[in-house]
Image (spheres, rainbow, N blue to C red):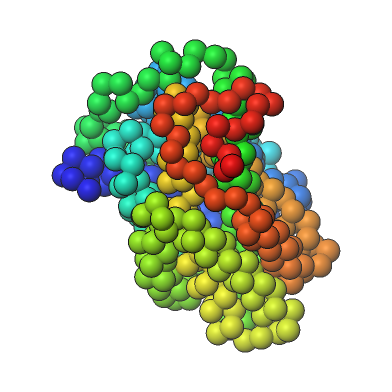
Amino acid sequence: MNAAEKKAVSALAGIFALRMFGLFMLLPVLAVYAARLPASTPLLVGLALGVYGLTQGLLQFAFGAASDRFGRKRVITAGLLVFAAGSVIAALADSITGLIIGRAIQGAGAISAAALALTADLTGEQQRTKAMAVIGVSIGAVFILSLMLAPPLQGAIGVTGIFYLGAGLAAVAVGVLWRVVPNPAAGAVADAVIDPRPWAQRFGGILADRQLMRLNAGVFCLHLSLTAVFVVLPQMLQEKSGLPLAGHWKLYAPVLLLSVVGMLPLVYLGSHNRGIAAAFAGAVALLASATASMAWAVGAGAGLLALLAALWLFFVAFNALEALLPSLVSRIAPATGKGAAIGAYNTFQFLGMFAGGAVAGWLSGRFGAAGVYAACAAVTGLWLLGVAAAPKFRLDSGDREMPAIGARSHWDSR
């Protein structure tokens, strides 16, 4: 990457990190906090955890498409302010219903599509996998810090304080966006001029594109698995390690740090057009192996090391796919609908998160952690079969238009 690309990617990675820090710190503590609120039930606790993904998923396409028309920075700013407002509402909530409402409003600040589209606008095609990897690594680093800091922070300022901290970090991200991130070159955001169709028609064109829908289905499976894993993982680690929740960072930190090292060969292979298909298929295979290993470790009563090894494999695959999938979307999507395509991608991503939380909550109540991991293994196994049977991706999108609803995709492999 050249100097301008490095500056842009670093600043955007910082924006992602600031926003995600406020979210990740809630993962180890929110379920326990929600369960203590008046009128709380297991189902409502699950909704408090998952409703963020639902509203994110429903609004990602709208935010992404709006960024094509009104500008990336304006839409990202609006989303960050909505997220901050939801954080304050959740902090003030004194019932499970209020917490769910706050979490839903947090999710309504759906900036991921617009921010990833801005990343694509500010980087060359051959640098996008690297750019997405930088963003992915920054989010991974924030994830590690969150798991380390959340328990002591919860003790010091409470979960309400963590919500207020998230709102403050969103405000800082707005400042970084306008003071550090450069503006795209003239013509980089041309959708509003070239493709004036209503959003519903543009979304239909995305649904008609088989290559984009393969990626959308993939990210749905990926985030379904991630969320489902973490519904039951903290309890499993506590049982197998004997560590209290406050000490779980000692387990997460080495696993996640080593997973970043493990993903580098896949990301390097995927940075070249000739290698991206193999890198993608290899990462999906690793993910299926990891979830199957988790199911075996829990079902067979294996020890802590077996579970941590499977978790490491899971995050190697997850980190690699988090870099490869959006890069593929940005390469395959037509120039007239890049933001809309990434918006649709993020819709499926967050709906997968919501589905993972809801399904895992139900499965854990009926079948325990083994049932949750077995379901993850089934989902990722089916994804792997689909990847193996599908034709290769074509990356020559050029300036072609999005196909009409029901039309054969211009980018389907012949």
Q: Residue at x 50, y 28 (%)?
A: 340
Q: Name the outermost residue toward the front.
A: 414
Point out the residue furthest to the right here. Answer: 366
Q: Is residue 74 visible?
A: no
Examine the rendered structure and indicate whether residue 135 appears above or below residue 374.
above
Taking the spot 74% from the left edge, 72% from the top edge, the residue there is 370
Q: In the rendering, at what x and y percent does residue 282 appear?
A: 52, 65
Image location of residue 373, percent across then percent down: 70, 67
Spot occupied by residue 228 in the image (x, y as percentages of width and height):
65, 59
Q: Is residue 287 above or below residue 411?
A: below
Identify whether 272 is placed above or below 244: above
Depth order, front residue of 212/291 = 212
Q: Quadrant of the C terminus?
A: top right
Vertical placement of residue 293 versus 74, above or below: below
Toward which corner of the image does residue 139 lie, by quadrant? Answer: bottom left
Expressed as whole percent of the image width and height from the top left, the position of residue 413 reads 57, 43
Identify which residue is drawn at 22% across, 48% down: 1
Q: Residue at x 64, y 42 (%)?
A: 351
Exactly how many numbered labels are in the figure?
0
Q: In terms of depth relative to the viewer, which is nearer, 196 or 399?
A: 399
User: In this rendering, would 260 be left or right of 163?
Assistant: left
Q: Quadrant of residue 183?
A: top left
Q: Quadrant of residue 338?
A: top left
Q: Can I make out residue 402 in this image?
A: yes
Which residue is at the far left?
A: 3
Residue 90 vs residue 125, the one in the foreground:
125
